Image (tube, rainbow, N blue to C red):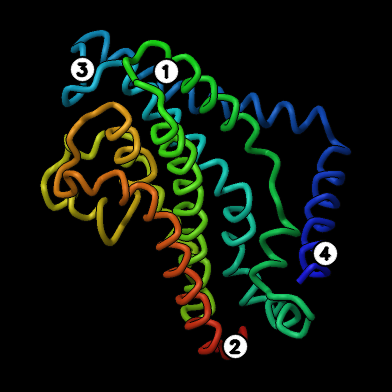
Amino acid sequence: MRETLSLLLYLVRLRVRTRLEFRASLVIAWVAQAFGYAGVFTQIWLILTRFENIGGWTWPQMALLLGFHTLGYALGACFTLVQLRRMEEIVLGGEFDTLLVRPLNPWAYLVFSGFNIEYGGHIALGAGLIAWALPQLPIVWTPATLALFVGGLISAALITASMITIIGACAMVLGRARYLFGIYFDFWELSRYPASIFAVPFQIALLSVIPLGYMAYVPVSVLLGRPVPYLASAAELAALAAGPLSVVVAAAFWRFCLHRYQGGGG
């Protein structure tokens, strides 16, 4: 186990050192990503300055929601998105077969060898929004509140990594599965808003089969003392448990697809 962890950390360090060889390009990518997201968030801010709130959420509350959503996503995606979005090409091109004969779990190799530090813009923007919003909100900080805040971010990262893993795993069975990422991001973009503003079926979906509502809406609602539909007093526990549970589901699904993998030729 110690040797495996050392190898995985070495792969991460190697990837980071390689990417830092092009520092100017990296900084430009960070700035471009931050500006892209900032443009979307500015649109939301303009709507709120005109209508004062969205479903009862004011701008400081929305800023915390957006920051939480962006930061949690970045922490999970830096390990998984770029790596597993290539699963279709890796499978069809035969590269995945070579990973199966290596003395290392193929998922672990893909994830850690492709660690992506280009999410610096996401992290800076998400953390900045949170840092600005928190002083504007009447949150009473206690050990339990702090645990919810940190645990909620970790859970959001785990949900992101799990959902991307599930989609990537589909390529082992379906061959072509990249289109599923488009569907995922359609729901992901909607999950940056309060789930309560959507119709009941969509609320239920975000809190069950598509657990993106737990990335930010549920933990932030609990922090703000806002009611969460269908969860009530269980919202805090659900916010912390959603990430680990999604990891269990993703791991089981990955193994399921791996056992049915028959090679790039089907």
Disc 4 to disc 1, how far (Cα)? 39 Å
Element type where label 1 sits in the image: helix
Which residue in the protein does label 1 denote?
A: 134
Q: Give neighbour class at mark 4: few <14, some 14-19, many 20+ (Cα, 10 Å).
A: some
Q: Earlier in the sequence, mark 2 or mark 4?
A: 4
In this figure, which residue is indicated by the disc labeled 4?
Answer: 7
Residue drawn 41% across the image and 48% down it: 185
Secondary structure beneath dot 4 equals helix
Residue 53 has which mark? Answer: 3
Q: Quadrant of residue 195?
A: top left
Name the secondary structure under disc 3.
Answer: loop
Residue closest to the eye, 236 or 59: 236
> Of the residues tagged 1 and 3, which is closer to the observer?
1
> Mark 2 or mark 4: which is in front?
4
Gap between marks 3 and 2 measured at Cα: 53 Å
x, y percent for residue 202: 18, 50
Q: CA distance from mark 2 to mark 4?
A: 31 Å
Which sits earlier in the primary sequence, circle 3 or circle 2?
3
* Type of amino acid under label 3: Asn
The answer to which of marks 4 and 1 sits earlier in the sequence is 4
The residues bearing labels 1 and 3 have C-alpha atoms spaced at a distance of 17 Å
* Quadrant of the snapshot with the C terminus: bottom right
Find the residue positioned furthest to the front. Answer: 143
Foreground mark, 3 or 4, reads 4
Kindly indicate the quadrant of the structure image that contains residue 54: top left
Closer to the N terminus: mark 1 or mark 2?
1
- Please give the residue where the numbered disc 2 appears in the rendered image: 265
